[in-house]
Amino acid sequence: MFDRVLVERTAEDDVAAALAFARSHAGRSIPAQEIAVRWALNHPVAARLAAARPGPALVDALDHLAVADAPSEDLLEAVGAWDRLAAWVAAGQARVLQELHRRSAGSTWAQKGLLDEVAGTLGASGRAARVLMDRAIALGEAPEVHDALREGLVSVRKADVLLRDTGTLTGEQAREVHDRLLPDAPLMTAPQLSAAARRAVLEIDPEAAQARHEQARRDRCVVMEPSGDCMATISAFLPAVDAVRVMRGLDTIAAIADPDDPRGIDARRADALVDVLADVLEGGRVLRGPAPDGRSRRRRQRAVKLSITVSADALAGASNSPAELDGYGPVLPDAARQLAREAAWHFQRTDPVTGEALEQPGSRYRPPDALRAAVVARDVTCTFPGCRVAASTCDLDHTIPFDGSRDAAEQTCRSNLAALCRHHHNLKTHGGWAPRRDAATGITVWTSRAGKPYSRAPVLPPGDHAQGPPAARRRAGGAHDAGERDGPPAGDPPF
């Protein structure tokens, strides 16, 4: 597979690489580990690349990979390996910049001159040099993030997300959040990691978070920036609840469009915003008259609904556990209490052991409202790894396809329903991917057409996050043997 042989591989090496891959990618789900080991043994080179830590040996292996002849499985893992190397390079660059910054610390002009020198050396702008220097300084104050970047456990973007979203905390508080989130960061997308970090920041010092929110709220604004091609960008800096209310309103208007309307949803939202405000300027009444496409409305106008999930303790003011605003993420409990004063409430029964929502099964193909609410509350988002489409807007898919000759109650039930956005629903139906939910852990394992597993951990409801992320609970529960770690093994597998 490589243009030259670096080290002769043995069957024992293949098994070691397979086990390393399974530990780092399948988490605590035994079925997922079995799938991962089977995949790794079938694709030993890909498994080695997936399990390898970044460093000179991995650089050499990738440099000599015969890309034109390699199987697709090997190439996909090569993409991941190059990404880990990019993190390793960024960590090394940051270490050098930290030393240069230390040497210039005694003079403001020396520090300014250093930025100019960095910019000149890289052929970059002063602003780009400032971004690199700011990252290096922040990494110097967060060695745990710097180490994870150097090990390739987090990408450059994920490291930036952690540093940015915890930048308002003290050093000790930031380290607490980093230690809580880093074990699970390799299997999270950057937006997921950002949401987890923002929730942790709200939890760690609620009073300070409330004060920052009030200050930021005073800075709310709407700005316009001219763009090319006679276009412009309008952006609004708003409180989370108001921003979601605006988007829900635009979604509601955009959904009224004629079925034959050729515009995409983004274009319909943009036209809805313009039409509503134009109607106001022209003295009309908002949401009256023709739809944004100029044709008559064919649907009855629906009320804009916001959904927020909050623990009973936080709602009663007995705790400061953040709430979850559908379409946004974690918000301060005050936002939930404010909405609760004007909202219709829905109480959800939960399993006392797992905390998952419980409801009775349906008697037909389409799940009843109570069952749908239970699945939406359990899944929170589409259950494909990394997808953040809100479950409330997803399809409820029968994991095992519905069979009209069998009892509907046995099939339209919580254990056989999962929230899938339309794209990932089609991926399952037509793309050959197969999801499987582990009832014992709540982990959903998707198996690709090539047989590789991808895991999606369950989303904890508000109030349960104090237990820590899945990896922390995994270690606390003893699911891993001593010496095991989340991520690649301690040594590089031989290539």
Image (cartoon, rainbow, N blue to C red):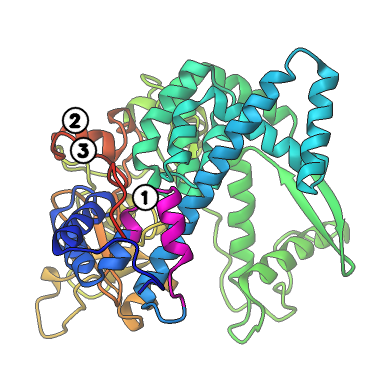
Would you say the residues marked 2 and 3 are in contact, meaning their CB atoms lie under 8 Å apart? yes
Percent x, y of residue 348: 27, 44
Identify the residue shown where x is 16% and y is 84%.
404
Q: Does dot 2 land on a helix, a strand or a loop?
A: helix
For marks 1 and 3, give the CA distance.
14 Å
Q: Is residue 176 left or right of residue 260?
A: left
- Within 10 Å of disc 2 (Cα), the crowding (few <14, some 14-19, many 20+) is few
Of the residues shown, which amino acid type is indicated by label 1? Leu
Q: Is residue 160 visible?
A: no
Identify the residue shown where x is 31% and y is 54%.
51
Q: Quadrant of residue 153?
A: top left
Query: Considering only order in the chain, which callout, 3 or 1, is on the residue closer to the N terminus?
Result: 1
Q: Is residue 209 left or right of residue 439?
A: right
Q: Is residue 83 visible?
A: yes
Q: In the depicted view, which residue is nearer to us: 191 or 423? A: 191
- Asked if the magenta segment contains residue 83, the reply would be no
For marks 1 and 2, give the CA distance.
19 Å
Q: Which residue is mark 1?
A: 187
Question: In the image, is residue 439 above or below residue 170?
Answer: below
Of the residues shown, which amino acid type is indicated by label 3? Arg
Region in magenta: 49-67
Question: In the image, is residue 72 above or below residue 359?
Answer: below
Identify the residue shown where x is 27% and y is 50%.
24
Of the residues shown, which amino acid type is indicated by label 2? Ala
Q: Which residue is mark 3?
A: 474
Q: In the depicted view, which residue is nearer to us: 220 or 49? A: 49
Give the number of the disc on residue 476.
2
Would you say the residues marked 1 and 2 are in contact, meaning their CB atoms lie under 8 Å apart? no
Q: Does dot 1 land on a helix, a strand or a loop?
A: helix
